[in-house]
Image: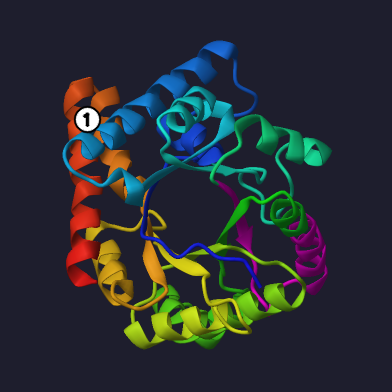
Amino acid sequence: MSVGYNRPLYILPFDHRGSFQTKMFGWKGTLTAEQTAEAAATKRVVYDGFLKALGEGVPQARAGILVDEQFGADIARDAAKRKIALAMCIEKSGQDEFDFEYGEDFAKHIEAFNPTFSKVLVRFNPEGDAAMNTRQTARLKRLSDYLHKTGRKFMFELLVPAEKAQLERLGGDKKAYDRELRPALMIRAIEALQNAGVEPDVWKIEGLDKREDCVRVVQAARRGGRSEVGCIVLGRGEDDKKVLEWLRAAAGVPGFIGFAVGRTTFWDPLVAWREKKLTREEAAAKIASNYKGWVELFEKAS
């Protein structure tokens, strides 16, 4: 099986759309052209921070961005020109069930930008709604087949949100769910998707507290001849301390090739800039410094 991507990969994701417009700007519903332009200009500050980090020594061969077409089309084109690893999201934003952002035109949009990775965010709990999981899996297999047939790379962001009954078993303790139930559920989800013909090159994985759980997740991702498949840790908007713990647990585990830490890297500097507490340059410098910090930590711990 020729799927996989096994080189170091340090992603700065800022493909947030629904959450970005509501939480950063307080906007609901369809945006005007002016609002869309303002959101795009705000994302440009994140990209400037990323470019600044490259200028300050983060190796471009290991660095990448994840951005959306709605607010980041110009950024995506610029990254492609600079030969920066580019991941673009192709799921509808803010839905519990995975579907294509551009419906039947999904392939046209991928071909127009030709990103290094096409990324999906999928909520998949193997003990969740079975009919929904079946529908999602069928769409994801279609995408996986298309990407591999056309020689493209597939990045899969797997979220395993707790089912009500699972949380109740733990007295409503979300941290206990993350620690005690989620690791095994993630492995079951990965195996179920693989068994259905969904074949990511990179799994973007919610952070794990224990190194042995990181090892087990890689074993699942790489089973059955998938020896080149990589895993990266996502930040999930957690605080610095939690992200550091997750990166330390994963770094150095063969198969964990990097991370994708977004909001924890850029959110506070962007808010401070919008509130005129930082200049644009200071906000970009803070984002660069945060991103470089994750890179240094991951490389040291590897």
Query: Does residue 255 lie above or below 74 as drawn?
Result: below
**Residue at 20 percent of width and 34 percent of height:** 55
Quarter holding residue 101: top right
Query: Does residue 34 lie above or below 41 as drawn?
Result: above
User: Does the magenta run of residues contain 138?
Assistant: yes
- Residue under pointer 1: 283
The magenta region covers 117-142
Query: Does residue 32 lie above or below 191 as drawn?
Result: above
Q: Nearer the viewer, residue 62 or 160?
A: 62
Is residue 277 visible to the viewer in this orientation of the structure?
no
Q: Check the picture and name the quadrant holding the N terminus.
A: bottom right
Which element is circle 1 on?
helix
Is residue 144 visible to the viewer in this orientation of the structure?
yes
Q: Left or right: 109 with respect to 52? A: right
Q: Amino acid at mark 1?
A: Ala
Q: Left or right: 186 with respect to 195? A: left
Q: Left or right: 104 with respect to 64? A: right
User: Does the magenta run of residues contain 167?
Assistant: no
Q: Check the picture and name the quadrant holding the C terminus.
A: bottom left
